[in-house]
Image: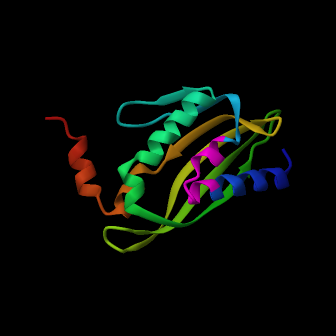
Amino acid sequence: MQSTEMATLAERLCEALATRDYERFTREFANEAIFEIPFGPEGGVALKGLPEIEAHFARVAASPLGKLIQIEKISSVQHPHSGPSDSFTLEYFVDGESVRTKERFKIQSSIAVIEVKDGKIVRYKDFPNTLGLVAAAGILPQFAAGLSKD
C-alpha cells in the first residue's frame, strides 16, 4: 500500500469517526472483513463479516458514552508495516470537550492494526483507550463502580 493511499484511508476513517458517521466508516470494510477488539471486561470480541461489524457500530452509535463527549477533531499517525500484506498501524487522537464537566481534552483514543486488500479493510484489530475516554467524559468513578461485581 502506497503511503498516499494509507494517508487517504486514514483521513476518511478519522472524518467518519469525528462526525460519528459509522455507516461511512463501515463502507471502508470488505464484505468478509474481521473486526477485533481483543481486550475488554467480557473478554475479546471478533466480528466476522460486514453485517456483524455494522451491527456493532449501530450499538456504538446508541452508546450513552458517545453523548458525554463532544468530538472536535480526530487525527492520526500512520505506521506502515513491512512484509507482503498491505497493513499498517494507525494511532488515533481525539480533541474534544466533556459535555458533563466542560473540560477540554486531547487523548490518544485507540490504536488499530489494519490490513487492506483491493482497497478495502479486511482485518481491523482495535485497541481502544476505554479508560481514557471514560475519564475524558468525566464518569470514571461511575464506570469503575459499574465494573465491580456484587
Location of residue 47 (image quadrant): top right
Q: Nearer the viewer, residue 62 or 38?
A: 62
Is residue 22 within the magenta segment?
yes
Left or right, 134 with reference to 37: left
Q: Quadrant of the C terminus?
A: top left
- Tell which residue pokes out farthest to the left in this image: 150
| Residue in the picture at 36% in, 31% down | 42
What percent of the width, then of the height, locates residue 58? 49, 40
Give me the residue at 36% from left, 68% from top. 99
Q: Which residues are magenta?
A: 16-26
Assess whether residue 17 is covered by the magenta stretch: yes
Q: Residue 5 versus residue 23: which sits nearer the camera?
A: 23
Residue beneath the point at 65% across and 48% down: 24
Image quadrant holding the N terminus, namely top right
Q: Position of residue 70 (x, y in %)?
A: 45, 66
User: What secondary structure predominates along the stretch shown in magenta?
Assistant: helix
- Compared to residue 20, the image places residue 81 above or below, namely above
- Place of residue 125 in the rendered image (x, y in percent of width and height, measured from the top left): 59, 37
Counting the numbered discs, the total is 0
Image-based side of 6 in relation to 69, left or right: right
* Depicted 48 relative to depicted 72: above or below: above
| Colour scheme of the picture | rainbow
Residue occupying the point 64% across, 57% down: 14
How far from the left and from the top, in percent, is residue 77?
A: 67, 58
Which one is nearer the viewer's eye here, 55 or 97?
55
Residue 76 sits above or below residue 104 on the image: above
